[in-house]
Image: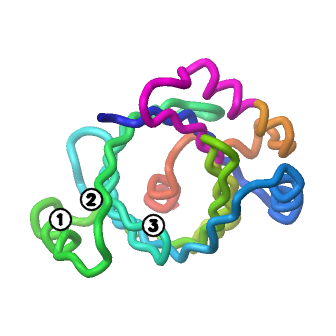
């Protein structure tokens, strides 16, 4: 079953400020994940294999490229770091691009926050309001995302419309 996520991505030169706000709101810090996202060539949406010390998933998602909060429809397969999955996907589909990042992961209820430092791109914040079973609703997810955009002081100029993979490919 697809997971519905309303998310934003923005450049962020004030990561310490974001950490202070999250700490003040009692966010659950899951840790620092060193992640490699390998994007594969596909006809529809995006397909990536995330390899990290916290998160390891094969992720397919459809998401429009637009600034501000946007909906992603996500299918997730939890993988293991020692599987042959990456080799199979590389042979079958070919690699589009690889994104390497340091990611701090925080949660407040159903909202996931990423404070990212992405190789060759810089510093970012991501907010993901997540509805795993359809019980929250798109409007509430949108409101949650917009509320944190305001709390963090994210300006319209800092919003990113596309994925890190697209930023790297267009560099």
Give the mark nearer the N terminus: 3 vs 2: 2
For label 1, the residue is 89
Is 86 left, or right, of 165 in this rendering?
left
> Which residues are drawn in magenta?
127-146
149 or 65, which lies in front? Answer: 149
Labels 1 and 2 touching (C-beta < 8 A): yes
Which of discs 3 and 1 lies nearer the camera? The answer is 3
- Residue 115: % across, % down: 68, 61
Mark 1 nearby-residue class (10 Å; few <14, some 14–19, many ≥20): some
**Looking at the image, which residue is at 54% across and 38% down?**
130
What distance separates the C-alpha of mark 1 from that of mark 2? 7 Å
Residue 112 sits above or below residue 37 on the image: above
**Circle nearer the viewer, 3 or 2:** 3
Name above or below for residue 114 compared with residue 131: below
Residue found at x 49% / y 24%: 135
Residue 31 in view (yes/no): yes
């Amino acid at each position: 079953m697809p997971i519905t996520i309303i998310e934003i991505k923005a450049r962020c030169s004030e990561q310490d400020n974001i950490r202070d706000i999250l700490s003040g709101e009692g966010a659950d810090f899951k840790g620092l994940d060193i992640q490699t996202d390998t994007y594969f060539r596909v006809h529809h949406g995006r397909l990536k294999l995330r390899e990290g010390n916290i998160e390891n998933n094969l992720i397919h998602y459809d998401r429009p490229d637009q600034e501000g909060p946007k909906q992603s429809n996500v299918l997730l397969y939890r993988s293991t770091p020692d599987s042959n999955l990456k080799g199979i996907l590389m042979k079958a589909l070919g690699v589009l691009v690889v994104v390497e990042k340091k990611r701090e992961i925080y949660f407040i209820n159903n909202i996931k926050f990423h404070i990212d430092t992405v190789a060759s791109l810089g510093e970012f914040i991501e907010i993901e309001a997540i509805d795993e079973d359809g019980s929250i609703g798109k409007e509430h997810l949108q409101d949650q995302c917009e509320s944190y955009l305001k709390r963090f002081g994210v300006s319209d100029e800092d919003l990113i419309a596309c994925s890190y993979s697209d930023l790297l490919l267009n560099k």
